[in-house]
Image: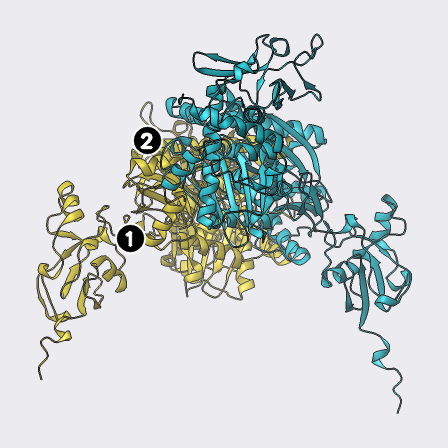
Chain colours: A cyan, B yellow
Amino acid sequence: MQLPYRMSDTPTHHQIALMPSGRRGPVPAGMTLLDAARQLGVELESICGGRQTCGKCQIVIEEGHFPKHAITSSADHVSPIDGREAAYRAEHPLGARRLACACEALGDLLISVPEESQAHKQIIAKAATDRVIEVLPAVRQIYVESVEATLDDHRGDWERLQVAVAEQWHLTGLTIDPLVLPTLQPALRAGKFAVTLTLWQETEVLRVQPGYAEGAYGLAVDVGSTTVVAHLCDLRTGAVRATEAMMNPQVRYGEDLMSRVSYAMMDKQGAARLHRSIITALNDLARKAAVAAGVSTDDILDVVLAGNTVMHHILLGIDPVELGGSPFALAIDGPVDLKARDLGLKLGAAARVHVLPCIAGHVGADNVAVQLAEAPHRQDELMLIIDVGTNAEIVLGDRAQVLCASSPTGPAFEGAQITHGQRAAPGAIERVRIDPITLEPRFRLIGMDDWLQPGSVIAEGGLRATGICGSGIIEAVVEMFLAGIIDPDGRFDESAPGRSPRVRFNGRVGEYVLADAGHTASGAPMVVTQNDVRAIQLAKGALYAGVKLLMAERGVAQVDRIVLAGAFGSYIDPRHAMILGMIPDCDLSRVVAVGNAAGDGVRIALLNRERRAEAAQIARSAIHVQTAVSAEFQNEFVDAMALPHATDPFPHLNGQLPARTAHASARRSARRRAPAQ
Amino acid sequence: MQLPYRMSDTPTHHQIALMPSGRRGPVPAGMTLLDAARQLGVELESICGGRQTCGKCQIVIEEGHFPKHAITSSADHVSPIDGREAAYRAEHPLGARRLACACEALGDLLISVPEESQAHKQIIAKAATDRVIEVLPAVRQIYVESVEATLDDHRGDWERLQVAVAEQWHLTGLTIDPLVLPTLQPALRAGKFAVTLTLWQETEVLRVQPGYAEGAYGLAVDVGSTTVVAHLCDLRTGAVRATEAMMNPQVRYGEDLMSRVSYAMMDKQGAARLHRSIITALNDLARKAAVAAGVSTDDILDVVLAGNTVMHHILLGIDPVELGGSPFALAIDGPVDLKARDLGLKLGAAARVHVLPCIAGHVGADNVAVQLAEAPHRQDELMLIIDVGTNAEIVLGDRAQVLCASSPTGPAFEGAQITHGQRAAPGAIERVRIDPITLEPRFRLIGMDDWLQPGSVIAEGGLRATGICGSGIIEAVVEMFLAGIIDPDGRFDESAPGRSPRVRFNGRVGEYVLADAGHTASGAPMVVTQNDVRAIQLAKGALYAGVKLLMAERGVAQVDRIVLAGAFGSYIDPRHAMILGMIPDCDLSRVVAVGNAAGDGVRIALLNRERRAEAAQIARSAIHVQTAVSAEFQNEFVDAMALPHATDPFPHLNGQLPARTAHASARRSARRRAPAQ
């Protein structure tokens, strides 16, 4: 007997394939393509949650037979355009595209997902090493349609809205910031009971806007002791909408960190003043960035901050005095979540702040940000990261274990405590070369492309040397060593004045004239003195000893990759760093300067909430190696003072510098005979 | 063979009995008596957690044989005084008492626990009905001994402290208020790494004090539309340390609630101004209460607030405009927890505020507080609670179900819209009696003990009548009815002027001279007019109709107990209320005025965190019955206008008022013939 119809005539499922991911599978007939894509593992962007309002889930229905997928796809295989989608298209022409949330699957389909419709977008950080950031922000917006209050329904508008959120977004247990609560009723009524909520961590409402609204922004701020850099990011797309930088205003209370800590110790109001000055700076940066991006500071609802431990504490209003002396106790090492208003930041009323965690008294949130960006804990290769500031933070690690330490290099690498030292800024000598035969120098200034050499004429009003920055003094010392002006112990060669009048002795203390009077802003010659060389030796000795300590702790004699982080790392020539003995021997092609890795790490934490958890994990699991109390460190330190390192650990450089090393080596024995200075 | 010793010679347990609870049982030998008591279900007070620092766990070891408990107890059966306990006793002589945390059980013991050593103290609220409050506050202090930072331990001080808290108090996952974090390091160092933490809900640190400290206070505030009353309580003992009251400063923007809502609607800055004025008032009250109690406002770390829905919204900075018109939508009905600083309250930096929940647009947090205090949901008896204000809030319920409604009585019961009406304040006529034969009145003023009657002489400067308050006008109307001046429809009896010149007619509109010129502050006589009678009829009709609606909803014709809440309930004579037909018939001994039950409810929520959860549950589960849209209500309302209620539902009064009701009844038929006014 034949039944009048067979149930199986109406298929219960259709085959869907999604490009470019290639994911495919059956989905229930009638399911929207937004849900279908999600079920097949492809998350489409959506703010309105499938209400044909935000237009973010655009797709293209491909037509034809696709043998690879065994699918015949047709625009007829989805429900037609009507209702809300039609209204949306009237305002926003979509051409061949459809809104996935409006299309019900009526047959097999091959769907192309344009890049901008993909959720969890991946963006590329503009660092030397391309860093891919998946956009999964802590703060995001959702559109919700609630219901009108009636006499019979005595619940509060907030309680009614929570039910709508649970139904439409499957989010429960939401709270609302108490300062946002007063905006709820006007927004609901202005939006005819539809509102856009801005959520933090899927748990707290930070903003309520009437109807459909778009635009939540975040600020990623790398609070350096010298420079503060803020990136204003669109939290939906991950795009950097504006970048603003300024000098850290705390500089007026002390050039380097320790002088700021001293200031806080000497003056009862010092810590509070330091705190207020950085908060004012952050407000300035936020305001400028908002203007540049054409948004309101009210639209900024998330902030991620990182800095070294002293900056970290001052940011949070914590007196940094304990960081100024042993045992360098942190007030808190874990990440701190708080309201921006509690710091005095003038952003959205309920804006959030996330402060990245610290590791130890001298290894701060900036280092955690560097690790988050460079991710040694995700690598098989053993990576050495060197981040040079007032202290050098050193990280050695791989997937198995990450060690870190802080080495007391002092501020010489930043140009401080150097006769003509200065911060890296326009006018600073940043590159130096010395002819090994004539001992004549040439150098380049920050802010000028051409190299200057003795006799170069600088036009009236042209840039002149104002000082020597960290990379300049390192190159100068290395070049002086390669040219035989100083010996491996760092002493000026007494025979060098005979080779060139640029080398001179005041009594038994040597100096080298790097810049002639005509090339300097002051009109006086600029010299590198014996003390300057000693300062660099001390600094590089401390750095190298720290590296060796970590390598010994890990039980390795070599590393696979060396990463030079920070502005300093960008300016310095890895070859010079290796000759100086700052870093251990490594194939030069495996030494990379990654620029502001800390800044990238902060941005990663802003754009991806899971990476915040990862940062906390990094801070918790990093093994901190104490340098100050280590006898091993002290021994290494003494050894590491010499140029190049006494055990000559640079096989990778041998082939590249035959002439110069030969020249220097030839002079070595003579100098050994000279009495110690 | 005899073993050299038997294990059983060393008892592994001792018998302990605790008085006055009578709890007893075996505890492991060597256990401290603090732990032993806890194990036997007797919680002793302890801030220091067993470190012989706070001295709160004092006990007395009884000596002798106690046959009832089969225990021979001796002071020798506990470890001797030494170490920390000896140090504590040197500062605080304890006499025969010991610190339970210092005593290890070495034998059987009978222990007396003085009242002040018992944790979860029970205190009695000073209400008409004694309310027992178990002290289990949301904010409490604990003493913790952390360890010093060392070079080898790179954790933050906060992380170290958390470990100590987990070990010593079994509390994990604590957070610390970001504004308190900066005080952590100085407090730890000033206290030699021992600190007292003030905790909120066992989860957040609100304060860190060096070493051992004592004193956390809370403020329970009943924000009435007319009067704001604040109780400053010791959160450990539950004791009220100071009570301060003041006029609600919003009165200047509108005497009654609806005029304040109108003010907020008319003036764009109105709601903000109303909010600021109440916050300023709360700060004033807190300051005065702190001075009175001899504490600092910094010591106030918890606040519980309640008020009607308009007050509730204005407190939270929410424009009350939606409450001014149908459907009277609440912005939020659930409880709100927030930081005091976010409301602009100047208390401890991290002080908390808990705002009790609301039930519906006209049934606010004050009503929830009343329910928390009177607890109909815990009773087997069916309880009717009437809380009269601008609206009357009516609650009818028992363990099975609680119904509530708001009845639009208007402000007549508060003395508004009455010719000589005024708020309950010194000089107001609050009690009235009228001789049923002579129609001569006597009355009593608020602020004066003696009754005044015609001819009484008031001394120069003595208190004179300034107006008639709610209870006064109700008694006046009831007495006028009982004396036959007005008939059951509320009309003035045209024959009454013939009985006394105090009853007069202007045309056909009657009035009664209640106070003669010599007894009033204005020097003019004070009358009760036909309009005043009508206003009271409308108000009582609305109230009674609301009560009947709830009774019908519940399907009952009678209630077991009637509770009159609020100041109004304290002033009014239940007998008069019943004759007027405000409340349904009930044995007069079962009608009780409970005074400021809302204030007690707020204090209960301040002192007991579990009762906060109970308040939330009350608000969630109460069934709100809408009066405004109910046809039944409208019918009841019309019926309930008459005096006494048309169906004469007061069998319990019959025996008490034979003369008067007979007198009134005798006149009824005559008046029926008179044409309707």
Amino acid found under the numbered disc labelled 2:
Val
Q: Residue furthest right?
A: A64
* For residue A3, above or below residue A485: below
Image location (x, y in percent) of residue A384: 54, 44
The residue sitting at 51% across, 50% down in the picture is: A617
Chain on which label 2 sits: B
Total labels drawn: 2
Residue that lies at the very extreme toward the bottom in this rendered image: A1
Rendered-image quadrant of the C terminus of chain B: top right
In whole angstroms, how far apart are the C-alphas of marks 2 and 1? 26 Å
Q: Secondary structure at mark 2?
A: helix
Q: Upstream in the sequence, badge 2 or badge 1?
A: 1
Q: Nearer the viewer, residue A261 or A110?
A: A261
Residue B668: mark in rendering: none
- Helix, strand or loop at mark 1: loop
Give the class, few, some or many, for how many residues have Cα within 10 Å of label 2's Cα (few <14, many ≥20).
Answer: few
In the image: residue B175, left or right of residue A388: left
Residue B121 is labelled as: 1
> Can residue B401 be seen at all in this image of the molecule?
yes
Tell me the kind of residue under disc 1: Lys
- Please indicate whether residue A257 sits to the left or right of residue A18 in the image: left
Horizontal arrangement in the rendering, residue B35 relative to residue A310 (left or right): left
The residue where tag 2 is placed is B291
Camera-nearest residue between B547 and A24: A24
A564 lies left or right of B23: right
The reply to whether callout 2 and callout 1 are in contact (CB within 8 Å) is no
In-front residue for pair A579/A389: A579
